[in-house]
Image (tube, grey):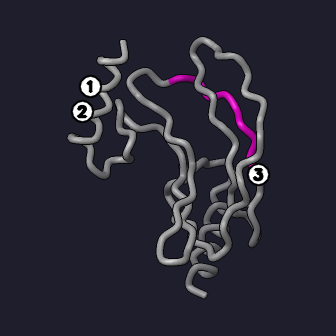
């Protein structure tokens, strides 16, 4: 019941803001229903200055709705983190996607060790 109230409040606020865009990560989405498996998408060839964001399931109106993949303009010094669902304690939590500084692949959880390990692996692969 609390989750529904949060969603209603978020929907009311979003509607009252008109064209103001808020990042997906500003509100926690918690549901009992697992998202369906990802849909197969045609991934177009790379484009200079753009990052491909794969499609994902978003929770809207008490159901999962597929959001198609799209191109986003690249942001130098940042990486894009895909929106994703994570299961915890029998519930599904939506972590909104967005831009993170540098190589923050773990969304800030263990920045130093985790990101240094990935940077080292990237250098070794070159």
Tell me the element at label 2.
Answer: helix
| Secondary element at image label 1 | helix
Q: Is residue 87 left or right of residue 20?
A: left
Magenta stretch, main secondary structure class: strand
Dot 2 crowding, Cα within 10 Å, few <14, some 14–19, many 20+? few
Query: The N terminus lies in which quarter of the figure?
Result: bottom right
User: Which mark is on residue 116?
Assistant: 2
Question: In front: 89, or 77?
Answer: 89
Q: Residue at x 70, y 42 (%)?
A: 55
Tag 1 residue: 120
Labels 2 & 1 near each other (Cβ < 8 A): yes
**Against 31, is 59 above or below?**
above
* Image depth: mark 1 or mark 3 in front: 1
SS assignment at label 3: strand
| Range shown magenta | 66-74
Instruction: Give the crowd class for mark 1: few <14, some 14-19, many >=20 residues within 10 Å.
Output: few
What is the number of the mark on residue 66?
3
Say whether marks 2 and 3 touch (CB < 8 Å).
no
């Amino acid at each position: 019941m609390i989750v529904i109230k949060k969603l209603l409040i978020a929907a009311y606020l979003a509607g009252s803001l008109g064209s103001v865009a808020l990042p997906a990560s500003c509100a926690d989405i918690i549901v009992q229903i697992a998202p369906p498996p990802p849909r197969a998408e045609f991934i177009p060839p790379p484009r200079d200055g753009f990052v491909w964001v794969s499609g994902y399931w978003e929770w809207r109106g008490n159901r999962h709705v597929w959001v198609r993949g799209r191109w986003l303009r690249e942001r130098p010094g940042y990486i894009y983190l895909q929106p994703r669902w994570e299961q915890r304690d029998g519930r599904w939590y939506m972590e909104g996607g967005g831009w993170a500084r540098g190589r923050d692949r773990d969304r800030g959880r263990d920045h130093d060790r985790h990101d240094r390990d990935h940077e080292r692996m990237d250098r070794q692969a070159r």
